[in-house]
Image: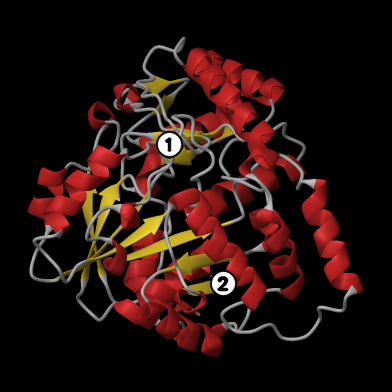
Amino acid sequence: MKNHLSDRINSMSTSATLAMAAKARELKSEGKDIIGLSLGEPDFNIPDFIKDAAKEAIDQNYSSYSPVDGYADLKQAIANKFKRDNGLTYGLNQIVVSTGAKQSLANIAMIMLNAGDEVILPAPYWVSYSDIVKLAGGVPVEVPTSIDTDFKMTPDQLEKAITPKTKMMWFSSPCNPSGSVYNKEELEGLAAVLKNHPNIFVVSDEIYEHINFRGGHVSIANVEGMYDRTITVNGVSKAFAMTGWRIGYIGGPEWIAKACTKFQGQITSGANAIAQRSTIAALEAPVSSIKFMIDEFHKRRDLILELLGEIEGFNLNVPEGAFYVFPDISSFFGKTLKGTLINNASDFALYLLENANVATVTGEAFGNPNCIRISYAASEKELREAISRIKAVV
């Protein structure tokens, strides 16, 4: 049957994070005690004031098609949020609301990229960037980083990756999967390179901005000369634990926003009406309303670093945001553990699933074959048990 499918779908990778989560669910259904540390999903419930806003929207009969680019009052709330949290001024005609930040990224790729256009991806990068770029006809250009540079791309690396075909650069800060956060000076260094290449646009994925342990998030669109060539992507999935509500959004040049609206109008139209109304409540609330989640993630980060630090062979940096650790486990390559030869990170992740009953994700899916991603969006009890199991089998 594969012959009847398009080359487009046959060449597309399956999301490694979703595949591992599905495998973990399958094993759970067979009665195995699996601890899932593969998905990037907060384990908190949605704050009650957001639920109340959703209930009110239902009572107010928000059941009709929503505007393709989002309700005007939601876009105003997004504009206010950009100003308050990021120091960025966007008009309503520069904002597009989509069904999750993933759709926002797909919209951008489809309206910006032509066949052969190159997109620079500092690796590790979020698992879907590469395939979204390929789907739009673009060519992902991976720029490898390592734990020694805190998984951050340097200006020199950026300059060397640029060719006449370079159209865009995509990155996330805080980064999924490494948790690394670019500071103002580092972003200014990258911007200094890009100023010499005025036709390159930047996608800045800031979905984890509030889950930031260094105190203060910096948007590259705020760096001198970058506002008109940056598309800032965000959403409510992570900071507000609203993963299933599927609301993402962009702020960027008006011509890009109009093109995204045009494209989205042919694909999904407007995002879910009830979720949009509840997002207004989420974004209008002070950041302090979700501080309890951020503080808990910070506590868990310190715990998992302490526990993994006791396992020989796990080389760790200190992530300053998001809720992942990305240990370099290449010291296990070529070794045999309980009769299993470990050739790469995929072998290691599968070994942990089968022998420790702990689901992680191979770093190969994120462009770094020496690492695995471990999500600490789980309870302290689960984290202690999971790392104890991992320690026992390695």
For label 1, the SS is loop
Q: Is residue 47 above or below residue 355?
A: below
Label 1 amino acid?
A: Gly
For label 1, the residue is 179
Along the line of sight, which residue is nearer the eye, 194 or 4?
Answer: 194
- The type of colouring in the image is secondary structure
**Residue at 26% over, 60% down:** 226
Amino acid at pointer 2: Val
Task: Name the residue nearer the viewer: 197 or 149.
Answer: 197
Residue 193 in view here? yes
Percent position of residue 182, x then y: 32, 40
Residue at image coords 44%, 13%: 309
Q: Distance between the residues labelled 2 and 1?
A: 25 Å
Q: Residue 97 carries which label?
A: 2
Which secondary structure, mark 2?
strand
Q: Which of marks 2 and 1 is in front?
A: 2
26 relative position to 47: left or right = left
